[in-house]
Amino acid sequence: MRAVKIERFGDPSGLVVAEVDEAPPGPGEVLVAVEAIGVGGVDAVIRRGTLSGFGFEEGLIPGSEVAGTVTTVGPDVDPTWVGRRLWAFTGTSGGYAEQAVARVEDITALPDGLSAADAVTVGSSATVAHFALVHAHFAPGESVLVRGAAGSIGIAVVELAARGGASAVAVTTSSPQRGERLRELGATHVLDRSGHGAPDAPESYDVVIDIVGGPATADFIDRLAANGRMVIVGVVAGMPPADFGSRLLASFQQSRSFATFSLDTVPVAARNPARAELLASVARGDLHAVAHDVLPLDQAAEAHRQMDAGTVFGRIVLVP
């Protein structure tokens, strides 16, 4: 089967199309004939080699999110899954391929009327957004700042915070045009990448959801209100500086807090029903699946070039 491999870490030219052996599903796994693949920010971070110290090696097939139809199930898996359309998490690799293997606890049946492309646009990102807000103890009436809101996770946070009764939903983004699109999705204030905006924008926020990370992380700790909570869910701009926590100590009397969030910490019993409801919300039109572009699998490198250039609004989808 065809797949895309990271031949070498670095720029997108290191992504190459290759013929690889099909992997049969093992115990507790299903094999999916892939119809759509979500290109995520973590894929770019892995491709650059940023996470090589965490066991990622050159030669791996990137991608963690696919949608398609089950063709085969492994031992101990309900055979009625065969022929069903689903969304699947493949782990931290294996998604950029014509077929993918996923554990049965990492799959969610697709509701009628939801396309595979829409499923991979929101299946992971909306679930991360939902539980990031839960992790931040977001409550109706609180103000929310979304740092890096033009990506699929950020868009989902904007919509979910607005639906959840936020008093204000501010976003950082790179252009007024992107800001207007985010306003259509529920944002009330548009800030530049440094967090500055119109005079009517709040100076501080109860909740900051950060998808960006990088050197400016500490500057957004300073934007927290008293008892404010910042949750970082991505590091697309790199790791925060080693001393970023000193900003929390410098504002000790404000009782601010900082947390990381990974979906890996959410039990399956909570995660999968939430994802199913979010996918159903998209099928009903209550949430939006914002796809920047749909490209063939062999243009994975082009998808990553666009991500590196910062031109993507929403998510790029690959199709075999």
Image (cartoon, grey):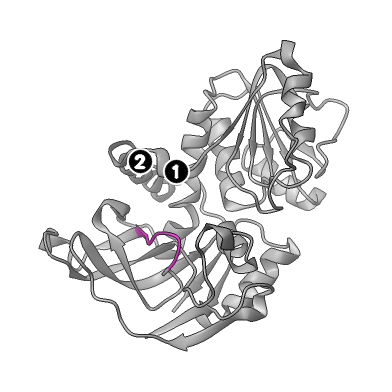
Q: Residue at x 71, y 39 (%)?
A: 171
Tag 2: residue type?
Arg
Q: Quadrant of the C terminus?
A: bottom left
Foreground: 145 or 267? 267
Query: Quarter of the image holding residue 162?
Result: top right
Question: Residue 172 at what x, y percent from top left?
Answer: 75, 42
Foreground: 248 or 13? 248
Badge 2 is on which residue? 271
- Give the SS element for disc 2: helix
Q: Residue at x 80, y 34 (%)?
A: 219
Question: Residue 112 at what x, y percent from top left?
Answer: 30, 56
Instruction: Give the magenta range.
Output: 88-93
Q: Residue at x 86, y 32 (%)?
A: 198
Left or right: 201, with 106 as reference point: right
The answer to if 92 sits in the magenta stretch is yes
The crowding category of the residue bearing disc 2, from other C-alpha atoms within 10 Å (few below 14, some 14 to 19, many at least 20), is some
Q: Is residue 24 above or below residue 262?
A: below
Tag 1: residue type?
Leu
Q: Overall secondary structure of the magenta stretch?
A: loop
Q: Which mark is residue 263?
A: 1
Query: Quarter of the image holding residue 202?
Result: top right
The crowding category of the residue bearing disc 1, from other C-alpha atoms within 10 Å (few below 14, some 14 to 19, many at least 20), is some
Question: Residue 166 at what x, y percent from top left?
Answer: 60, 25
Rounded to the nearest angstrom, the CA distance separating label 2 from label 1 is 8 Å
- Give the SS element for disc 1: helix
The answer to if 83 sits in the magenta stretch is no
Q: Which mark is residue 129?
A: none
Residue furthest toward the bottom? 19
Closer to viewer: mark 2 or mark 1: 1
Q: Are marks 2 and 1 in contact (CB under 8 Å)?
A: yes
Q: Quadrant of the N terminus?
A: bottom left
Q: Is residue 1 above or below residue 67?
A: below
